[in-house]
Image (tube, rainbow, N blue to C red):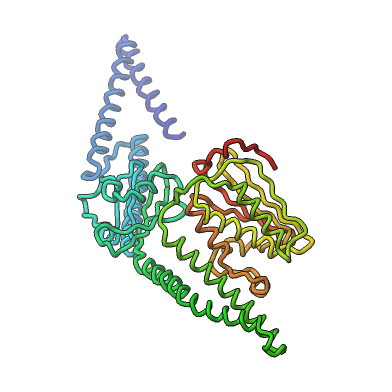
Amino acid sequence: MKIWLLVLLKLAGVLALGLVFGLITGRIALCLLIALLAYTVHRIWKLHRLVHWLRQRNYSNPPSLGGMWDEIVTEVLRLNRRKRYHKQRLVTMLHELRDSTAALPDGVVLLNARGEIVRFNRMAAEMLDLHGRKDIGIRIDNLLRQPEFLKYLAGSDFSSPKVLQTSTAPESWLSLHVLPYGEGQRILLIRNVTRHVRLEAMRKDFVANASHELRSPLTVITGYLETLAGDETVNEQFGAPIAEMRRQADRMAGIIGDLLVLSRLEAKEGEVEGEAVDVAAMLALLRKEALARPRRPASVTLTIDSQHRLLGDDIELHSAFANLLDNAVKYTPAEGNVAMRWWTDEAGAHFSVTDTGPGIPAESIPRLTERFYRVDTGRSRASGGSGLGLAIVKHVLQRHGGQLDIASVEGRGSTFTCHFPRRRIAPPVAGSNTGR
């Protein structure tokens, strides 16, 4: 405020001086005009010096213009120092970021909104065979042309990475994970998972081979146990041990059978096409089988809200639905209830099994589809569970483009729901009506 007051006082002084000369010479208007013109020329000259210094400030010292002009010069110098400080800070941060990404064991590629490469680190260059400035600005889908990656990149679900076999090294596998950020920009994280893929393949081969090798001797053991159980000459005191051995042999046979089913499912790649499966008829048969068990809940109900069929593999779908119903029947007390439902809507086709069993702790739900995982190990073994049923369900649903949803409250029961996409819905059998 003082600066502007000083400017006004200077202007008033100039006008007063012009007025005095005007009174002396008798030409007041002319003298005032000359005074204002001189004041304006002086200001323009100072403005010219200021502009010249602003253009050459990196090479010349700031001028001493006095008054308000020195305040402007001081403010410009202060802003310039602040700009240099922030610029240096940003440069330092950029160098640190570049050095940190270069030290990462995984590849990092920055993509703009058009999918063009903006920057990449050394590991990304090695894994994707990128070459310095040559590949900057190139669309990533022009360098990685695997159909699976192109479909993944064009989609919107980046919750999990995509594992692909590299074209440069057929025996190598890369995990590609897209992370969106900013306005349409994306980070592509690349990790070499060759060792993990090979270990997983070895594990699958081992399980499949071991299951096949155990099947034959187990069949022999089971046959001899059945013979001993039916032999009246065997001492009665061996009856209970033989019955227990038969029960354990049957349980082992069930585990081996489930392992072989899993091995066959894992050996098949991609989604199954299959044929139209009459789900309503399949579920009605499963309900009859459940009601025929010696140990079962008080009621097993089935609600059919749609007669639409499902495109898929009949044997695989039967295995998945049977495993879900089997779990519900095993863990529901005799006075409890199990309810099945089949329906379709705008989202797709759905099958659910609801029980009134003990329920599942919230922390265990994410792990239920892991192999051999049991919430209550002792109780599962007592009921004959192998811990593989839900793993089979998960693989079957993956083969049909579906997913499993689990909702449970401890002490109040659980609901397992299979969701299938709309493309899997097939028209009903001719002449059928929707019913319950």
In the image as oriented, which residue stretches furthest toward the right? 335
Mark count: 0
> Height in image: 290 above or below 275?
below
| Picture quadrant where residue 193 is located | bottom left
Q: Nearer the viewer, residue 29 or 3?
A: 3
Point out residue 375 in the picture as x, y percentages from the top left corner.
Answer: 63, 68
> Height in image: 259 above or below 419?
below
> Height in image: 263 above or below 128?
below
| Picture quadrant where residue 100 is located | bottom left
Point out residue 182 in the picture as x, y percentages from the top left corner.
Answer: 42, 45
> Height in image: 74 above or below 12?
below
Query: Could you tell me which residue is drawn at 69 percent across and 49 percent down?
Result: 302
Query: Could you tell me which residue is drawn at 63 percent across and 41 percent down?
Result: 306
| Picture quadrant where residue 297 is located | bottom right
User: Does residue 146 appear to the left or right of 255 in the view shown?
Assistant: left
| Rendered-image quadrant of the C terminus | top right
Point out residue 205 in the picture as x, y percentages from the top left corner.
Answer: 41, 70
Q: Nearer the viewer, residue 234 or 279?
A: 234
User: Does residue 120 appear to the left or right of 364 in the view shown?
Assistant: left
Q: Nearer the viewer, residue 151 or 13?
A: 151
Point out residue 78 in the picture as x, y percentages from the top left corner.
Answer: 36, 45
Query: Could you tell me which residue is drawn at 61 percent across and 64 percent down?
Result: 364
In the image as oriented, which residue stretches furthest toward the top? 26
Q: Nearer the viewer, residue 90 or 223?
A: 223
